[in-house]
Amino acid sequence: MLKSLNTFIFGLTPEERVRKWQANLRKESRLLDREIRQLDQATNKTKSSLKQLAKRDDRKSCRILAKEIARSNKQKERLLSSKVTLNSISMQLSSQLSTMKVTGSLQKSTEIMKLSSSLIKLPQLSSTMSQMSQEMMKAGIMDEMLQETMDAHDEEEGLNEEADEEVDKVLMEITGGKLDQIGSMADKELPVPEEQNHDEELERMQKQLDGLLRG
């Protein structure tokens, strides 16, 4: 009761602020874990469908799905990298607590500022990291955010326009090289699959993965 009253009157202590930030970082890391699992599940289903299409020699549809898988792989790399960055910030904050025992206050950290700025690019973390960064500025840990968010849009475009070599790599991996000429045949007129619901199924898988990629 006394602690709650003190918090209401004086606000959080520096140590309490750091613990709160670290709890938020752990929460965001768990949310990224869940998104990665969902992305893996959707990607595995798409890979299975691509294998079936490869058996029917439906090269055009295979390439469409391969592009979605390549985007998914790129997004997963970003999510995993962001988890590492979240952990790095938490470790830097632990170091702040150790330093505070000597100096009596939180210290300015260029490293925390740089790591936090990089996470604002990710839509899943943008809101949380923006708010946390504002709190850290008030606490004296950072002056202002680094201007690293300007390339965020360009990175998202990179996910939408995956390079042909990445798509070819996915096709090679999943089909075992059976469709090694798929790239050169992607724009040729190809037989229409017999199944009437083929286009609908293909569109459904694309939308499922695209929804996860957009977060």
Image (cartoon, rainbow, N blue to C red):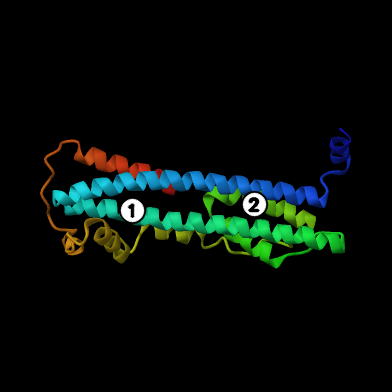
Q: Residues within 10 Å of mark 2 (few under 14, many from 20)?
A: some
Residue under the image location 76 percent in, 49 percent down: 17
**Secondary structure under badge 1?**
helix
Q: Nearer the viewer, residue 3 or 61?
A: 3
Residue 215 pos. (x, y %) = 47, 46
Amino acid type of the residue tagged 2 in the rendering: Ser
Q: Residue furthest top?
A: 1
Could you tell me the amino acid type at mark 1? Ile
Secondary structure beneath dot 2 equals helix
* Residue that carries the numbered disc 1 in the rendered image: 69
Q: Which mark is residue 160?
A: none
Give percent across and percent down for residue 152: 51, 59
Quarter of the image with the N terminus is top right
Residue annotated with mark 2? 130
Specify which label sits upstream in the sequence, 2 or 1. 1
Q: Residue at x 20, y 40 (%)?
A: 198
Q: Which of pointers 2 and 1 indicates the residue nearer the eye? A: 1
Q: Is residue 101 left or right of residue 176?
A: right
Is 192 displayed left or right of 214 in the figure?
left
Determine the CA span between mark 2 and mark 1.
Answer: 30 Å
Residue at 28% across, 42% down = 203
Residue 132 seen in the figure: yes
Image check: 136 left or right of 202?
Answer: right
**Within the image, what quadrant is residue 164 found in?**
bottom left
Q: Is residue 6 above or below residue 92?
A: above
Residue 98 in which image quadrant: bottom right
Viewer can see residue 141: no
- Tell me where residue 18 appears, x and y as whole percent: 74, 52
Query: In the rendered structure, are the residues bearing label 2 and label 1 in contact, judged by CB atoms less than 8 Å apart?
Result: no
Q: Is residue 60 left or right of residue 137?
A: left
Which picture quadrant has residue 110?
Answer: bottom right
Few, some or many C-alpha atoms within 10 Å of disc 1 (few <14, some 14-19, many ≥20)? many
